[in-house]
Image (cartoon, grey):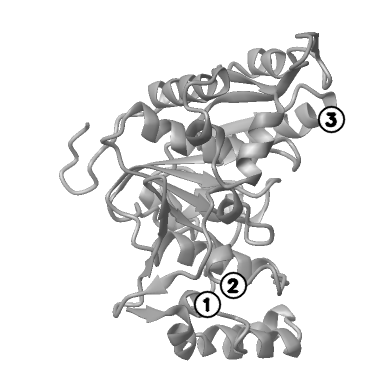
Amino acid sequence: MFSCRALQTFSKTLLVKYAPDVGVPYRYNKWLHSPSCTAFSGFSRGFASDKATQKVGGSDPERMQRGLPKKLPIAGVKHIIVVASGKGGVGKSTTAVNLALALKANDPSSQVGLLDADVYGPSVPRMMGLKGLALADERQLIEPLVNFSIKCMSMGFLVEMDKDPIVWRGLMVMSALQRLLRQVKWGPLEYLVVDMPPGTGDAQLTLAQNVPISGAVIVTTPQDIALLDARKGAEMFRRVQVPVLGIIQNMSVYECPKCGHREHVFGKDGARALAGELGLDLLGDVPLNIAVRETSDSGSPIIVAQPDSTLARTFREIAQNVVKKLPQYVDPITGRKT
């Protein structure tokens, strides 16, 4: 096994050939080769050559005629589930982490992975209680870090994010995301949960263009402002022909732990109404509870820390609803459905 430092030898293609074209300052080129950069090196075989477009669906011949790449599955991964939101601050990462753990809790025999696709602000390392740097084998494939039986990968395992921020333009982010998808030893997995960055930009299009996504889950609060962006997120996935499995209403109600008084801090049933308007299912309601925040910050999410709690049961029910909405898996080699 080699540390990701060893992979810096083939990062020169990315930096020398492409960095000047995307306007990356010289000091960041130098930084990527410095000892403080422990690892982007593994993701250096070039940028995505396909052009971003909203029309990324259709059959393979149609996609090729439009200049789009053929969607290739990730080796050994059956279902890719993206967890997205139109805006930040709605609890998307917390939901994605607990969804992955709930999928595993509901079916302990299943293999589950968790990909942190937020290159600029990765949250998975902290929430999953993982520290350290990822390693690469002799084939330059990166080993995911594992905790609670979940395979995890994040930019936080490749670059020392506590010391150095990621300051890249879109092309570099798209390239990094493709490497996180293709250059990690994911398989075998029944489910790969992807914690998407907020918005409807490069990361979302990169995934939609390059891999077959089984479905998207939209996370929102009941607040009107959040619902506006949640609607845009759902519409974006529909335009790129990614099935929207449903909406999760996070922070739906606050219940005082002392007196039991319930208060709809962010509004009442806004996500339920939005789901009805869009013809989608409401996959579940997650209340505003300090235990969710505390357990996530401590690196032992609620599913693990309090498996018999009402909150843990809520996430397991959401996971059940997600699985019910997934399409049948079709083996890309045999064509058999399972």
Q: Horizontal placement of 110 versus 193: left or right?
A: left
Q: Nearer the viewer, residue 228 or 185?
A: 185
Amino acid at circle 2 = Val
Q: Position of residue 8 (x, y in %)?
A: 49, 86
User: What numbered label is drawn on residue 39?
Assistant: 1
What element does badge 3 sit on?
helix
Identify the residue position indicated by label 3 in the image.
225
Quadrant in the rendering for residue 70 = bottom left
Amino acid at circle 1 = Ala
Figure check: 152 above or below 172: above
Identify the residue position indicated by label 2 in the image.
159
Disc 1 to disc 2: CB gap under 8 Å: yes
How many residues crowd around disc 2 within 10 Å: few (fewer than 14), some, or many (20 or more)? many
Q: Residue at x 38, y 31 (%)?
A: 105
What element does badge 2 sit on?
loop
Q: Horizontal placement of 33 versus 200: left or right?
A: left
Q: CA distance from mark 1 to mark 2?
A: 6 Å
Which callout, 3 or 2, points at the residue further toward the start of the chain?
2
Q: CA distance from mark 3 to mark 2?
A: 34 Å
* Residue 184 visible to the viewer: yes
Q: CA distance from mark 3 to mark 1?
A: 38 Å
Which callout, 3 or 1, points at the residue further toward the start of the chain?
1
What element does badge 1 sit on?
loop
Q: Residue at x 47, y 62 (%)?
A: 180
* Residue 215 visible to the viewer: no
